[in-house]
Amino acid sequence: MDSPVLSATQLTKTYGTTVALAGVDLTVRPGEAVAVMGPSGSGKTTLLHCLSGILRPDHGEVVARTDRVHVRVTDLKDADLARLRREEFGFVFQQGLLLPELTAVENVALPLMLSGVDRRTAENHAAGWLGHLGLAGTEGRRLGQMSGGQVQRIAIARSQVTGPAVTFADEPTGALDQATSSEVLGALLHATVGRGRTLVMVTHDEAVAARCSRIVRLRDGQVVHDTAWQPAVHGGAA
Amino acid sequence: MSVSSLNVTSVGAPTDLRLPPTASSWTAAVRIARVLADRTIADRSAWGLPVTALAIVSALTLSVAGGVRWFHTLEGEAGAFYQPMSMIALVLLVIPLATLAGAAARLAASRRDTRLSSLRLLGASTTTVRALTLIETGAIALVGAIVGVFGYLALMPVFGLLHFNGGPIGPAGLWLGPGPLVLGVLGIVVLALASSAIGLRQVEISPLGVRTRQRPPRLHWLRIAIGGVTIVASVLVMENLSVITEDVATMVVYMLVALAVPMLAINLIGPWVLAMLARVDAARAKTPVALLAARTVLDNPKAVWRQVGGLALISFVAVIVGVAFSYTTGPTSNPQEAFMAADTRTGALLTLAIAFVTVACSVGITQAAAILDRRALHVGLDMLGMPVSAIDAARRRAIMRPLVAVVVMSAGPALMLVLPLAGATQTFDPVSLGTTLAVLAVGVGTVASSLLVTRRTLRGVVAEGVARAE
């Protein structure tokens, strides 16, 4: 079996007197689509943030091992963490969090430009991703001229443009209707696990989780259930 | 959990209310405003910045008005000398002060998006929602203006120390009286309501949210045509002042108009020129910071202009002050002439200082509000790995690049106006040029400092946002 792309050991995180994570161990292997589920306040988003280096756990460690890096995420300095997040990880949030001033292609090209790729190359590559996700012809459009589903697919394109080993998604379909949600989820799975990459996704939606290869359930900051590995269902891509 | 399992005491459902057949949108707005008043007071982010901005505008406006009033109490030769000067200062300060008041009012109206869309969702008409916004903006403006009155009272002893006409003005000299104070407060409220009403035309309030119209209003090329024609007309008036009239009082009025009109023209042309330059910048941008900065300007050139337009005034005045300094620094044996020259310098520096404070406030307040309004986006970008320094650099560049354009755009027409009056020798005299450049440097430095101050807000918002992410 492949070595894990992410290993978390005994992660704990507290906010004041609230325990968000209470000694979580989690290993994620390449190609897995892991749905992290649990009631509100169970620690799902905190786990996602600790795994991706957005938050530092109080105790425990996270190790990332990709084709390009092998690092202890919890030991990295802020600047290195920002670079790791930009180049090795992809992110898709519920709100999209795209820059409204920029066009679709500029939004997708931005992470590449931040990593030093020249604008023309970055935009060509970004346009390729937009086309791959069924958004050809929208390159010069602004976000306000696009639907919620299209905006979320732009966010997926942006998350994939640097070729990340792991993509983290936090309720990526939470603000969409059922049909659009299914379509966007298909696009996300297609763009990640469909290409042998890894997806870690926080969701409340059982239907969304059912399309992942593995479901990890949290309660009170602890893993209470972890399903066996099975292939992800990534049909319905753009 | 099923409904039957809930431990509720059955008291029977209330009978349906008979709804009035029609309700006036304004009546509904007043009722809702009263209900929401407590929430509005508790939400400091909704009123803190606008009240501060309006208080500053009001304190400065009343202080300037107090000064102008004092100059108009002078009689004889002194009155004839100081009164036109004070009117020039007033004309020069009207636009930046009005701009800051407008920015503050827009800020007050734009910070309650969720509430407005929720009300629309509940069935409130667009008119009710807009009326509610105007009522709240009016209340915020009233509070700001009243706080400003206290600011004005506190500043009276400070401005009273200034020496004009051979002695200090004295705090009492700046006292406007209760009538003008009330009028000043009402003026600020009316200005805020007018700005708010104009700002509201640019947002769509639907049950699904409040958003700025996606297609930014196009800036018509006629702006530049009208602006250009008015500047040329002003220059012609200045050049032919003695031909148009021989009466000194009429001449002063013409001069005031000829000064005010190009400033209005610059305000008309400004956003159009900024958009044009940003379009070129966006096409040429090679770095994410340059691209984002150019797109920020293009997204709303008028908003950027509102922040930097105050520097147009400073550049404009800087040229005039420079020439005035070269006139007033020469040796003179007449003591009356000497203190009049010194007073001219004091007046010019005071006008510029007030303009600097106004510009600094405009930039600082608008930037702080923009950072707070885009809190979620900034936090998200940080999570994605976009360094806060890059976000900050783009934000600062989106202001500092247009500044250069503003300086050139304003100093040019000012030179065209001054040249026919002062002649080339006086205009390009080292004292004149040195003063102009020093004033411009302080102006640009002031804006840059305001941006640096708001950097802390950005870092704080991102740090707090990440901590709150769960």
Image: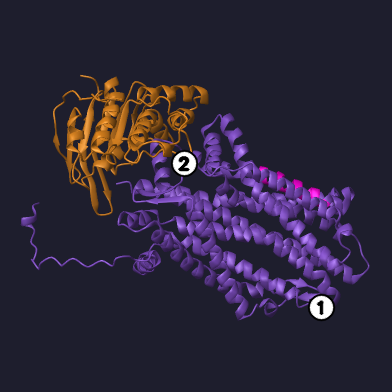
Chain colours: A orange, B purple
Q: Residue at x 13, y 28 (%)?
A: A228
As helix, strand or loop, the secondary structure at mark 1 comes to: loop
Instruction: Where is residue B162? Give x, y as percent.
Output: 73, 71
Q: Which residues are magenta?
A: B405-418
* Amino acid at pointer 2: Val
- From the viewer's perspective, tell me whether residue B272 is left or right of residue B239: left
Give whichever of B379, A190 is nearer the camera. A190
* Amino acid at pointer 1: Glu
Give whichever of B439, B291 is nearer the camera. B291
Q: Nearer the N terminus, badge 1 or badge 2?
A: 1
- From the viewer's perspective, tell me whether residue B366 is left or right of residue B155: left
Give whichever of A237, A44 is nearer the camera. A237
Chain at numbered mark 2: B
Q: Are marks 1 and 2 on the same chain?
A: yes
Magenta stretch: dominant secondary structure: helix
Q: Which residue bears the numbered disc 2? A: B388
Vertical side of B81 occupied by B409: above or below: above
Q: Residue furthest front?
A: B21
Q: Where on the picture, by quarter, is residue A84?
A: top left
Instruction: Where is residue A169? Give x, y as percent.
Output: 30, 35
Instruction: Where is residue B68? Give x, y as percent.
Output: 71, 71
Vertical side of B422 occupied by A151: above or below: above
Look at the image and tell me whether residue B151 can be seen.
no
Residue A45 inside the magenta-drawn segment: no
Q: Which residue bears the numbered disc 1? A: B75
Q: Where on the picture, by quarter, is residue A151?
A: top left
Residue B410 inside the magenta-drawn segment: yes
